[in-house]
Image: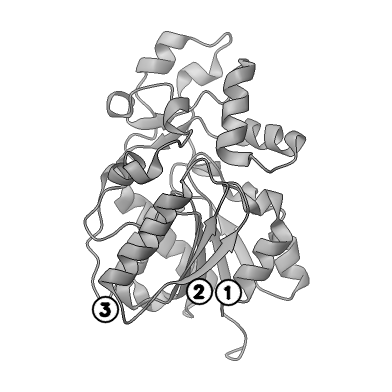
Amino acid sequence: MSGDPAPLLLLHGFWHGSWCWSEVLPRLAAAGRRAAAVDMAGHGLRARRPAFARRSPADAQAQATEVSPVADVDLDHAGDLLIAQIQQLGGGRPVVVVAHSAGGFVLTRAAQQAPELIAHAVYLAAFMPASGVPGIAYIQSPENAGELIGPSLRADPAAVGALRLDTSSSDADYQAQLRQAFYGDVDPDAADAAIGLLSPDAPAAIVTATTTLTSDGWGSVPRTYVTCEQDMAIRPTLQRRFIAEADAAYPGNPTTVVALDASHSPFLSMPERVADLVRTVT
């Protein structure tokens, strides 16, 4: 009905899938809120695993050199898919889109291309790039110093076309690093289960592309940024930079900011809080 709140679409970040919202969705349903989680291009049921990942024991040389089967997935593909998913969920109505981590690149592209489809953009510890700035520039910026994703990569993204993790590694120190990067405040058993669900490859072409933003495109969409103060994947200083850049570019449409004392994945560590937060945006 027209008086109902806008549907919620939940978009995950790199290496994850729609599964990561499994603790949030039932809480939204219990509150009577229509919501759906979707897979980003190259992820979840749309992921394609490299050949080395299907062999045992692992081939370290192949891991470092095999071109990723998702190397052809770029920001154009990801943005177009998200727009289609928004249209399907909304059925002609604008939708609230919640993006986590690298899902922010895709949300930004979709909001620029089809701002009329998005009632509100929520960036949950997500990349919120400025106009014309590629994701890689933020990843390597001083504000992101100390992050643990870069040290966890197991191949040169320029060579294999992907940001590659060794999700099946038996190295205890490496597994601990992944837990700290993504799930620092998540129950250890749940964190280990989540690592087992990660795709090894995330398309590098998403972080090397840029989106040109305009005041009547992305700049016109109401937005909320949710910072995570324990984040070791996107450091809190970088999260605050995103907010400052957006507000400087579009001062007439300032960012609403909510702070969580959480690691990079509050949808697993505090799903009730995340559900309450996103359902009250509009």
Q: Quadrant of the C terminus?
A: bottom right
Q: Please indicate, yes or no, whether residue 204 appears anywhere in the rendered image.
A: yes
**Which tag, 3 or 2, sits closer to the chain's start?**
2
**Which tag, 3 or 1, sits closer to the chain's start?**
1
Q: Secondary structure at mark 3?
A: loop
| Amino acid found under the numbered disc labelled 2 | Val
Q: Nearer the viewer, mark 3 or mark 1?
A: 3
- The correct choice, above or below, for 17 with respect to 155 in the image is below
- The correct choice, above or below, for 63 with respect to 216 in the image is above
- Picture quadrant where residue 185 is located: top right
Q: Secondary structure at mark 1?
A: loop
3 and 2 marks in contact (CB < 8 Å): no
| Amino acid found under the numbered disc labelled 3 | Asp
- Picture quadrant where residue 175 is located: top right
The number of discs equals 3
Q: Please indicate, yes or no, whether residue 81 appears anywhere in the rendered image.
A: no
Spatial separation of the CA atoms under disc 3 and disc 1:
23 Å
**Which tag, 2 or 1, sits closer to the chain's start?**
1
Residue 122 image position (x, y, % from top left): 49, 66
- Residue for badge 1: 7
Spatial separation of the CA atoms under disc 3 and disc 2:
18 Å
Residue 135 image position (x, y, % from top left): 32, 47
Q: Quadrant of the N terminus?
A: bottom right
Farthest-out residue, bottom:
3
- Residue for badge 2: 95
User: Which residue sits at x=64%, y=18%?
Assistant: 172
- Residue for badge 3: 216
- Category of crowding for the residue at label 2, using alpha-carbon neighbours closer than 10 angstroms: few (below 14), some (14–19), many (at least 20): many
